[in-house]
Amino acid sequence: MWSEIVFVVERDAVEAWSDALLEAGAASVQAEDADAETADEAPIFGEPGEPAPAGGWLRTRLAALVDAGTDAPALLERAGAICARKPPVRFELREVPDQDWVQATQSQFAPIPVGRRLWITPSWHLPDQGAAPQAARSIDGRHAIVLDPGLAFGTGSHPTTRLCLEWLDEHLRGGERVIDYGCGSGILAIAAARLGATSVCAIDIDAQALDSARRNAAVNAVTLDIRATTDPRPAPADVVVANILANPLRILAPLLSGLVAPGGHLVLAGLLDRQAAGIAQCYPAIALEAWRSLDGWTCLAGVRRS
């Protein structure tokens, strides 16, 4: 059995207390925003190309994992002596029940039906987990995409990924040439291939993402042209989808516009609702409009002028 010693510290004390707690005997230390889900919640990550917010949260909640039965005040005294700080006056000691952590983690990722034709599922939710992935390529009449969570972004659960999947589901009719720029796990590229695209190019700057896309393409028995951003660019395509972030989409506007064939479609996601209009203005050759919004995120889509 395990317990957690939980208390709040100021921003400049987080590192000192975390190191001291570990040295004093804690198995691990978790830090989170003490003001999360309140008006004082603060971001600590900025978008690529933009200044990052101040490092750390103004008030941080530390949770030190310890053996059940640990003398919490004594451990806090030892940690305080190590980091030369007074032990917290207020703290909470809460029980952490034993559980199957693998099963608990897997239970967070359920199959996701998308639109009319797609079904995103982790491998452990396949009807027959012993079957080859190809044998489970259709579930309830939908194209099944088998995707286990990993290092690369894209499991189908995030609103930006879901919006792109919904656009592909509603618009691809088969025979299209598709580019997925910033492919992450490869989920959008795989979906395009399953929906009948004749060629799909998946591009990313991250080597781990490219490896993930290769593995996922193999699991789903689809063929992708997988390239790094430093590789030669593919020919312009009928559909270009980029699910990244606002600032990269702003910087990449000339490149992405050039990847869309005349009369082709550009689909952009990774945008907060308030960012959509500004990004659309960066693409004068393409009539971008807000296609759909979900949970504060907007998907832009438009056709390249001939």
Image: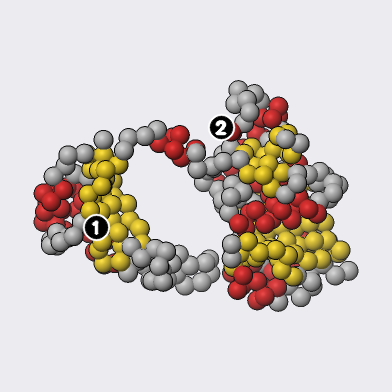
Give residue 159's mark.
Answer: none
Q: Neighbour class for label 2 at 10 Å: few (<14), some, many (≥20)?
A: some
User: Residue 71: where, in percent of width, then height?
Assistant: 13, 45
**Residue at position x 59%, y 65% in the image:** 296
Question: Which picture quadrant has residue 160?
Answer: bottom right
Q: Nearer the viewer, residue 17 or 250?
A: 17
* Amino acid type of the residue that numbered disc 1 sits on in the rendered structure: Phe
> In the current view of this chain or complex, which residue is farthest to the top?
130
Which residue is labeled 1 in the image? 7
The N terminus lies in which quarter of the figure?
top left
**Residue at position x 65%, y 76% in the image:** 278
* Amino acid type of the residue that numbered disc 2 sits on in the rendered structure: Trp
User: Residue 297: where, in percent of width, then height?
Assistant: 61, 64
Whether residue 234 is situated above or below residue 221 in the rendered picture = below
User: Residue 53: where, in percent of width, then height?
Assistant: 42, 71
Question: Which picture quadrant has residue 269?
Answer: bottom right
The local secondary structure at tag 2 comes to helix
**Residue at position x 44%, y 38% in the image:** 104
Decide if residue 93 is on the left or right side of residue 140: left
* Residue 254 appears in view: no
Decide if residue 51 is on the left or right side of residue 14: right
> From mark 2 to mark 1, how far is it between C-alphas?
37 Å
**Residue at position x 32%, y 52% in the image:** 30
User: Residue 43: where, in percent of width, then height?
Assistant: 43, 67
Give residue 124's mark.
Answer: 2
